[in-house]
Amino acid sequence: MEKRNLGLVQEIRSCREDEPIYPKDLKTLKDYPRILYYKGNIEILNQQKSVAVIGSRKISESGGKLSYMAGTIVGKKGFNLVNGLALGCDTEALKGALAVGGKCVVILPCGINEIYPKSNEKLADKILSQGGCLISEYPEGTRPDKFRFVQRDRLQSGIAQGILVVEAMEKSGTMHTVEYARRQKRRLACYYHGLLKYSTGNSKLEDLYKANIIKTNDDLEHYLETLSEEDQYTQLKFDFV
C-alpha cells in the first residue's frame, strides 16, 4: 500500500521566544510573535541562512521556469528556502529546492492543522519529509482569513536574510512582503523585469527599492554568496514619494 502524507502526521509543537530553537532573526522585528506553532525541524532556521523566494500566483511560463531554477540554486547553495506555499512562484521555487535535496520553510496564514492552499498538501508533506518545517503564529483551528496573509508576510521577510522576487505585478500581495523587507533592512533582489510578462512589481523594485537585479544564474549565485558572507546587512535608505 502506498504511504501518503507521512510528514503531515507529525505532532504540532510550539516554541516560545525564550527557547533556544526560536528563530533568532524574528526577534529583530518589533512585533515578532511571542510563540510559534510548527511541524518539522524549526532548528534549521538557526543553523543555516534563509532566502525567501516569492512572487505572484499568476505567473508567465518564464516566471515558472525561473522560480524553479531559483529554487534549485538556493537549495544547492545550502540556504533554507522560505515562502508561503502559494500557487505560482512560491510553489515552483519549493519544487526546485526539494528536487536537489534543499530544506524549505513555509509560513502559513492559518493554524498548522490546515494546509493552505489544500492543493499543495502533498508538497507540504514532502517539505516535512525532507527535513523542512511549517510555521505559523496562529494556534490550531485558526482560519486563513484575508488579513492574516498580510500579517504572515512580515514573517516571510523577517525570518530570512534575503528576499528574491521572481515575478510580480505592482499590486500583487508579494509587494507587502517587499515593503516589510525594506523596513526590516533585509537585502532585496528581483529578476530583471524584461525577462518576464507580469513584472511591474519587478520594475518598481529596480527603480524605487534599488534591489539587486538578477539576469543570470551567475547573478543569483553572486547574490547568495554576498548573503553568506555578511553577518548583518543594512539596507540603504531611500526617499519614497
Image (cartoon, grey):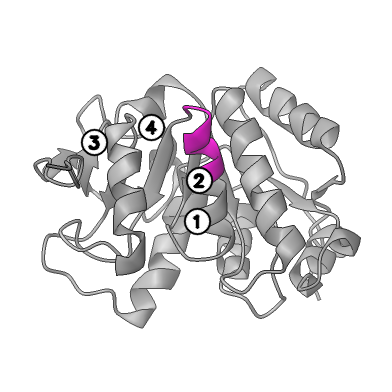
132 up-or-down from 178: above or below = above
Of the residues under marks 4 and 3, which one precedes in the sequence? 4
Q: Earlier in the sequence, mark 2 or mark 4?
A: 4
Q: Residues within 10 Å of mark 2 (few under 14, many from 20)?
A: many
**Residue 40 marker:** 3
Question: In the rendered view, would you say 239 is above or below 143?
Answer: above
**Nearer to the camera, 121 or 223:** 121
Q: Is there a contact, CB below 8 Å, between mark 2 and mark 4?
A: no
Secondary structure under the numbered disc 1 in the rendered image: helix
> Does residue 123 belong to the magenta stretch?
no
What amino acid type is highlighted by mark number 3?
Gly
First to last magenta residue range: 95-101
Foreground label between 4 and 1:
1
Q: Position of residue 206 (x, y in %)?
A: 85, 59
Query: Which residue occupies 72% across, 23% down?
Result: 225
Sooner in the amino-acid sequence: mark 1 or mark 3: 3
Picture coordinates of residue 30 (x, y %)?
41, 52
Q: Amino acid at mark 1?
A: Thr
Where does the N terminus fall, quadrant-wise? top left
**Frontmost residue, 179 versus 83:** 83
Q: Secondary structure at mark 2?
A: helix
Question: Which residue is at the far front?
Answer: 1
Q: Secondary structure at mark 4?
A: helix
Magenta residues, dominant SS class:
helix
Q: Which residue is mark 2?
A: 95
- Element assignment for label 3: strand
Quadrant of res 171: bottom right
Q: Which mark is residue 24?
A: 4
Left or right, residue 110 beside residue 141: right
Q: At x 26% / y 27%, what residue is drawn?
A: 21
Residue at image mark 1: 91
Instruction: Please tell me in which quadrant of the rendered image residue 199 appears.
Output: bottom right
